[in-house]
Image (cartoon, helix red, strand yellow):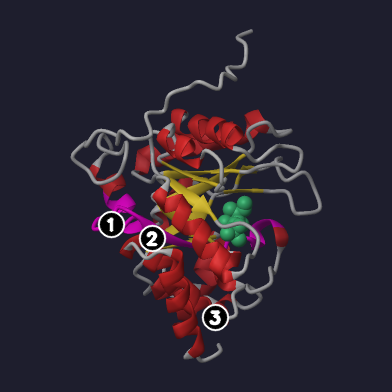
Amino acid sequence: MPEADSRDDKDFHVEIPPPEQGYFLKGSGAYDWGMKNRLARIFRPDSGRTVMLAIDHGYFQGPTTGLERVDLSIVPILQGADALMVTRGVLRSTIPPTHRGGVVVRASGGPSILKDLSNERIAVDVEDAARLNVDALAVQVFVGGEQETQSIENMTKLVDAGYRYGIPVLGVTAVGKELTRDARYLGLATRICAELGAQIVKTYYVAEGFERVTAGCPVPIVMAGGKKLPERDALEMAYRAIQEGAAGVDMGRNIFQSHAPAAMLRAVASVVHDGADPDGAYELFEELAGSAVPV
Ligand code: R5P
């Protein structure tokens, strides 16, 4: 049994960018046309980044605050995001098929918030994903969790299925309550997702060592939002993640639970795509929020 490699002197060469591969996204040069085209619907080729709006929470926690009526709270602000992360149920029932942004469909599920969340199965057939014309499939990976192997198998099966149709997979690193959310853990979890085939990885921001997490992951990392923070703090977190190598954000509650979700989306986009700093982005938020008409 190999020993865990917990040395502290690993060198991620964070100052050296990854090699150019003839495609704008890190580690993505060898994919087929269809997969590259789908990735370009999620990540903007001009900035190489994405603002993904996550509204898939209902798949395990039902009607989440802010998502009680997706038709009223989310549909009107959809155009502010580059991509939407959503369940296929809400996609079919509520998102207009005229929507032109990227679509990432939640493809794992099973347990509710009342049970062991790591006990997920694959919840979408790849043929249905192709029928829905989705741009990526998202799957939760519980490294160190009770059902670690099963969740990783969910991901690798989706990666195999995705390659048949040119659909990339977004591996979402889920951190159980009993695990420490630090750079060492996230470095382990994100790298496992990429090594086993995920073309995009979603993970949390950590104040210490996040640049080592992004440098050590050979494919793009998008920052997860997490629980609702004051808007200024959420913008600061997004700013830092981008400065430290994230290729975008995938935020939910910090956008749709804001008192001005459209303004927050625009402010996040200014950080991700336009190089705004937290002060500039917050100023923009306040200005837009002040003129916002409540939905
Ligand atoms: C859970 O782990 C999911 O990926 C989410 O339901 C969602 O994407 C979380 O978004 P946020 O934490 O930004 O509200």
Label 1: which residue?
Answer: 47
Q: Which residues are magenta?
A: 37-60
Quarter placement of the C terminus? bottom right
Q: CA distance from mark 2 to mark 1?
A: 8 Å
Which residue type does callout 1 highlight?
Answer: Ser
Which structural element holds mark 2?
helix
Q: Quadrant of residue 233?
A: bottom right
Q: Is residue 244 magenta?
A: no
Q: Considering only order in the chain, which callout, 3 or 1, is on the residue closer to the N terminus?
A: 1
Label 2: which residue?
Answer: 272
Which structural element holds mark 3?
loop
Whether 42 is drawn above or below 35: the answer is: below
Residue 165, image x, y percentages: 35, 44
Which residue type does callout 2 highlight?
Answer: Val
Note whether residue 54 is visible.
Answer: no
Residue 218, image x, y percentages: 38, 33
Label 3: which residue?
Answer: 260
Which structural element holds mark 1?
loop
Q: Tell which residue pokes out farthest to the left in this image.
A: 22
Q: CA distance from mark 3 to mark 2?
A: 18 Å
Q: Are marks 2 and 1 in contact (CB under 8 Å)?
A: yes
* Along the line of sight, the residue nearer the viewer: 225 or 59: 225
Q: Considering only order in the chain, which callout, 2 or 3, is on the residue closer to the N terminus?
A: 3
* Point 63% across, 65% down: residue: 229
Q: Considering only order in the chain, which callout, 1 or 2, is on the residue closer to the N terminus?
A: 1
Which residue type does callout 3 highlight?
Answer: Ala
